[in-house]
């Protein structure tokens, strides 16, 4: 039915069209909708996003391609097929001691929430079993990557606007920061293993 088609979220990603119903007057669903400028409306949508995120997480559905998410928090979990391609993470984001098996963060944006202070992004203790694609990702908050990268870590064209801490990170199959951008105090590396990618990054741009 035509009406039904119009009521579906307009977002189209690599995995196909989103099938969720639209939210309020938006052309997108709760997860894909941008935050409105009105504070009360934004607050309401944030709460709905958190709830919806929890529901998908509970179903072990980790396809959040193109979604705008609020204060994502994972700890001590195993996540398979995490699709965070072009996902916008707002506020502090935690993937602490999370083991990823096939994770995709290409084009993901990590940014702050205007209403919050002392925000950062943490992958502390995270383990990437397969490749870790973060190409074109943008970190607008300080980020800690004290993580184990078992395979290739792809940070090509990634942008770090604030501090990026790779202290204690280990890279099993190399890391690439080619054409990456480090602003602020940039890349902090800790000996011995993470020093090489950080140093090579500085030679590459
Ligand atoms: Zn959608």
Image: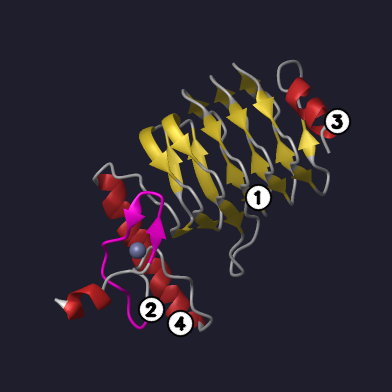
Label 4 or label 1, whichever lies nearer to me, is 1
Front in this rendered view, residue 183 or 72: 183
The dot on residue 139 is 1
* Crowd around label 3: few <14 · some 14–19 · many ≥20 (10 Å): few
* Sequence-first tag of 2 and 1: 2
Q: Calculate the distance from the C-alpha at mark 2 to the C-alpha at mark 1.
A: 27 Å
Residue 76 image-quadrant placement: top left
Front in this rendered view, residue 179 or 54: 179
Who's the residue at 46% across and 76% down the image? 42
Ligand 1 appears in which quadrant?
bottom left
Front in this rendered view, residue 86 or 196: 86
The dot on residue 40 is 4
* Crowd around label 4: few <14 · some 14–19 · many ≥20 (10 Å): few
Disc 2 and disc 4 in contact, CB within 8 angstroms:
no
Who's the residue at 62% across and 54% down the image? 119
* Crowd around label 1: few <14 · some 14–19 · many ≥20 (10 Å): many
Q: Calculate the distance from the C-alpha at mark 1 to the C-alpha at mark 3.
A: 21 Å
Bounds of the magenta segment: 11-26
For this view, does 86 lie left or right of residue 13? Answer: right
As helix, strand or loop, the secondary structure at mark 4 comes to helix
How far from the left and from the top, in percent, is residue 69?
A: 45, 58
Q: Main secondary structure of the magenta part?
A: loop
Label 2 or label 1, whichever lies nearer to me, is 2
Q: Calculate the distance from the C-alpha at mark 4 to the C-alpha at mark 1.
A: 27 Å
How far from the left and from the top, in percent, is residue 187?
A: 78, 36
The dot on residue 26 is 2
Q: Which residue is mark 3?
A: 203
* Sequence-first tag of 2 and 4: 2
If the image is split into quadrants, where does the N terminus sit?
A: bottom left
């Amino acid at each position: 039915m035509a009406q039904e088609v119009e009521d579906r979220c307009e977002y189209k990603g690599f995995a196909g069209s989103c099938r969720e119903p639209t939210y309020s007057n938006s052309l997108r669903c709760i997860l894909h909708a941008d935050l409105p400028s009105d504070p009360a409306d934004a607050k309401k949508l944030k709460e709905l996003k958190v709830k919806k995120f929890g529901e998908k997480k509970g179903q072990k559905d980790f396809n959040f391609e193109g979604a705008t998410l609020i204060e994502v928090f994972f700890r001590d979990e195993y996540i398979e097929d995490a699709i965070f391609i072009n996902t916008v993470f707002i506020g502090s984001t935690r993937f602490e001691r999370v083991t990823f098996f096939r994770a995709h963060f290409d084009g993901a944006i990590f940014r702050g929430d205007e209403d919050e202070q002392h925000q950062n992004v943490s992958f502390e203790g995270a383990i990437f079993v397969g490749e870790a694609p973060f190409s074109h990702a943008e970190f607008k908050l300080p980020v800690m990557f004290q993580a184990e990268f078992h395979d290739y870590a792809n940070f090509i064209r990634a942008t770090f606007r604030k501090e990026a801490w790779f202290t204690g990170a280990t890279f099993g199959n190399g890391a690439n920061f080619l054409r990456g951008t480090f602003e602020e105090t940039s890349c902090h590396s800790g000996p011995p293993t993470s020093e090489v990618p950080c140093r090579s990054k500085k030679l590459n741009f």
